[in-house]
Amino acid sequence: MPDRFKQTNANLSLDSQKNNDAVKNTLYLIVIMTISFYQF
């Protein structure tokens, strides 16, 4: 039981890490688009 719990915790933290990366990439993309938009 504890091992399964640890595994689930690891999977959850991995998923949240992936989500954080996706959010960062999206924000980065928005910033880049905004900057390039205002340059023209």
Image (cartoon, rainbow, N blue to C red):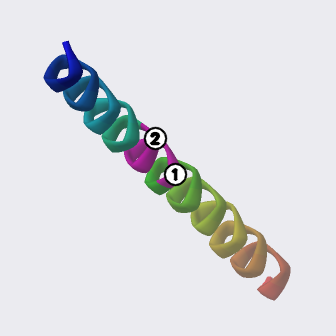
Q: Is residue 24 above or below residue 38?
A: above
Residue located 84% across and 80% down the image: 38
Name the residue nearer the viewer: 14 or 25: 14
Q: What type of secondary structure mainly makes up the magenta span?
A: helix
> Which residue lies at the image location 15% right of the left edge and 25% below the top edge?
3
Determine whether the residue tagged by mark 1 lies in a helix, strand or loop: helix
Residues packed near mark 1 inside 10 Å, few (<14), some (14 to 19) or many (20 plus): few
**In the displayed structure, does residue 12 sit left or right of residue 29?**
left
Q: Amino acid at mark 1?
A: Asn
Using residue 6 as the reference point, say whether residue 18 is left or right of it: right
* Number of residues whose C-alpha sits closer than 10 Å to that of mark 2, classed few (under 14), some (14–19) or many (20 or more): few
Residue 14 image position (x, y, % from top left): 32, 42
Residue occupying the far front of the picture:
2
Q: Which residue is mark 1?
A: 20
Task: Say which amino acid is labelled 2.
Answer: Ser
The C terminus sits in image quarter: bottom right
Q: Are marks 1 and 2 in contact (CB under 8 Å)?
A: yes
- How many numbered marks have been drawn onto this rendered protein structure? 2
Q: Say which quarter of the image contains residue 9.
A: top left
Report which residue position mark 2 lands on.
Answer: 16
Magenta stretch, residue numbers: 16-20
From the viewer's side, name the closer residue of 37 and 17: 17
- 15 in the magenta segment: no
